[in-house]
Image: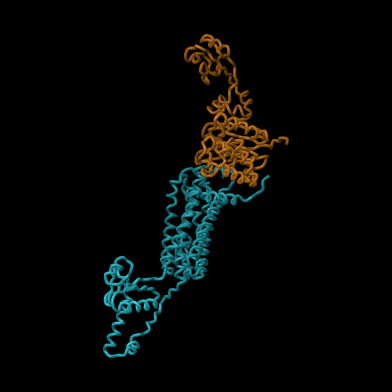
Amino acid sequence: MTVRRRMWPIIARREFVERARDRGFQVSTAITLVLLTGVIVISAAFNRPTSFDLAVVGEGSDALGTQVRVAAAALGVEVVVHELADEAEARRAVDAGESDAALVDAAQILVRADPPDQLVGLIQAVSVRERSRRALITAGLTPEEVDAALVQAGLPVHALEPVDARSRETATVVFVGVLLLYGQLFAYGYWVAAGVVEEKSSRVVEVLLATVRPSHLLRGKILGIGLLGLGQLLLIGLVGLFASSAVGTLDFPSGAVATIGLVLGWFILGYFFYASLFAVAGSIVTRQEDLQTTMTPLTILILGSFFIGLTATSNPDSTLATVASLLPFSSPLVMPTRIALGEAATWEVVASVAISVGATAAVIPIATTIYSRALLRPGRVRIRQVLRPDGG
Amino acid sequence: MTATPDDALELVGLERRFGAVVALDDVSFRVPVGEMVGFVGPNGAGKTTAMRIALGVLQADAGRVRWRGRDVDAETRRRFGYLPEERGLYPKMRVLDQLVYLARLHGLERDDARSQADRMIELLGVADRARARAESLSLGNQQRVQLAAALVHRPEVLVLDEPFSGLDPVGVDVLSEILRRQAEEGAPVVFSSHQLELVERLCESVVMIDRGRIVASGRIADLRARDPRRLVRVEVAGAPERWLDRVPGVRVLEPLSEGAIVELDGASESNVLDAARAAGSVRHFSVVRPSLSEIFRREVAR
């Protein structure tokens, strides 16, 4: 006599193992990881402090160049000064892109086409100050009087919305997080739908239904595929974290870890909601070709939520973002951003999670009913038809 | 174990409608332990619907399915073996993994499932394809894997919808032997088939269904004995075309290359023999019992 045992873990295990073994899955995961690492390494290379090369030619240029370098360093900009033999040499260096600008005889600035504003501005300011200084000395003031008058502290800058480096970094991490969430919710939701259609179109579902209840079949499928999605997301997060700290792009690793945690949490919330709906989209068709049609409303819903999620990374307190962060279909793509950027009130987070869990709890039984009743029906099934009380 | 009247799979008063169509109308029959029962009927008669209901894949509008005297539930059905009419395997899953998985779903522990799956692919001659994906197998081999899937969990009861269709003669022999052994080991075996000669060869009993109603059931020998028709098989060489049509009181049931099986409807055996002698040189003349096919044609034509 066999023991009464739960069937859905066996089903979940198959879904997980069969898909993890799939070559396509392994290759796409590897590509994602390579791309992610590549982007992190390249952006680290581009994020070096701003640096300019300044060629100096002729009398006075060298001294002025040195002053430009000092003034630039005060602003956190690096200026490397090269002394060249003559103007022709300077023209060649600028033309070849070796130098960003050349200072000729302390009287003329030479650039190629598009002047590097920051560098030119610095040279202009230093040069104006230097010429004013000389004019005042010529007019009879002592150098001390001149310096006392000219060397003044800059004006203090008061930011109305101070940007701190930490939240700027968080915004970047959360932006990547929203991208990943969108990709995961869509890809794994699609897998649930395609898996349901595969069982229907290959008719293996009848073999399964002789021993498994449809609700267990659905539960096992959603859990197995979801676990794989969560695992893949975790792997991507860890590799990203590791790569960033290896190249030193992350100044606040703890913030990144918290953001990754948020993304994982909202993947779980969003996945169960969407996966149930994707299962319905799969159960009402028999051929993979027809799946695109029944998935369209879900595709639009996810894509729309994704765009709101993107706008929220730059504008987390807009009305649109606030409302979207509470609705069950868009909250997974919007709320993590608002939380990470500190724009979500505690009650909003609690409400959003509660609404999401509640909506999922409401959707699952309906989805299970439609799925169970549509499984053995051939062709395109109408949802209204299977939801009638006698629709079984 | 001694057989009691309860030692059987029983379908009791099954009713099922699909919209306005009555698929099953008071369908009842029993498959005793250790017996192989053929389930025959024309296409669309309700065989598949009845089998699906027996397996719980489909719900009946009324009626019950009983095993060993008790209504079957999901737990009991897990110990049934089922071969659906519409064959189905996971196309991308490896043969062995597939069987282990199905055995697990039927309640076997992992090691047991594994060794049973190994045993079944060996028995059905597909052991060399164990690591192949199901979709890469020939249709005949897919069919064998499908049968392995129905048997892998040592089912107590076997319900097979058209198990012989798509098999070559060797496959038919292998499967016949397997089913016979299952029955000997005490499982009730019921299978549907359109190959009535095969049913006649394999089964002691048969159930005939037509338009959702059971039209005949019982031991094949009894059905044949009960058939009131007198049949004669006659073969004549060199006879003129359609000579039997001109013999009064005779109806041709099944034309043969040099004669026919005829039903005597007024004529006597000697009338037919005389007519045969007159027509040419008689090669064969015998009084026969109606075959299952003939009983089937008669029941279904009613």
In the image, farthest residue toward the top: B278
In the image, farthest residue toward the right: B2
Residue A89: image quadrant is bottom left
Question: What colour scheme has been applied to the protein in the rendered image?
Answer: by chain
Q: Position of residue B233 (x, y in %)?
A: 56, 17
Q: Quadrant of the N terminus of chain B?
A: top right
Q: Residue at x 43, y 46 (%)?
A: A289
Side of A144 where B216 appears, left or right: right
The colour assigned to chain A within the rendered structure: cyan
Q: Is residue B64 visible?
A: no
Q: Quadrant of the C terminus of chain B?
A: top right
Q: Nearer the viewer, residue B72 or A73?
A: A73
Q: Is residue A269 visible?
A: yes
In this rendering, the answer to whether A98 lies above or below A63 is above
Q: Nearer the viewer, residue A39 or B256?
A: A39
In this rendering, the answer to whether A366 lies above or below A116 is above
Q: Nearer the viewer, residue B65 or A288?
A: A288
In the image, farthest residue toward the front: A85
Q: Residue at x 46, y 44 (%)?
A: A287
Q: Position of residue B221 (x, y in %)?
A: 63, 25
Q: Nearer the viewer, residue A191 or B3?
A: A191
Q: Position of residue A39 (x, y in %)?
A: 44, 61
Q: Position of residue B22 (x, y in %)?
A: 53, 38
Side of A351 where B30 appears, left or right: right
User: Which chain identifier belongs to the orange chain?
Assistant: B
How many numbered discs? 0
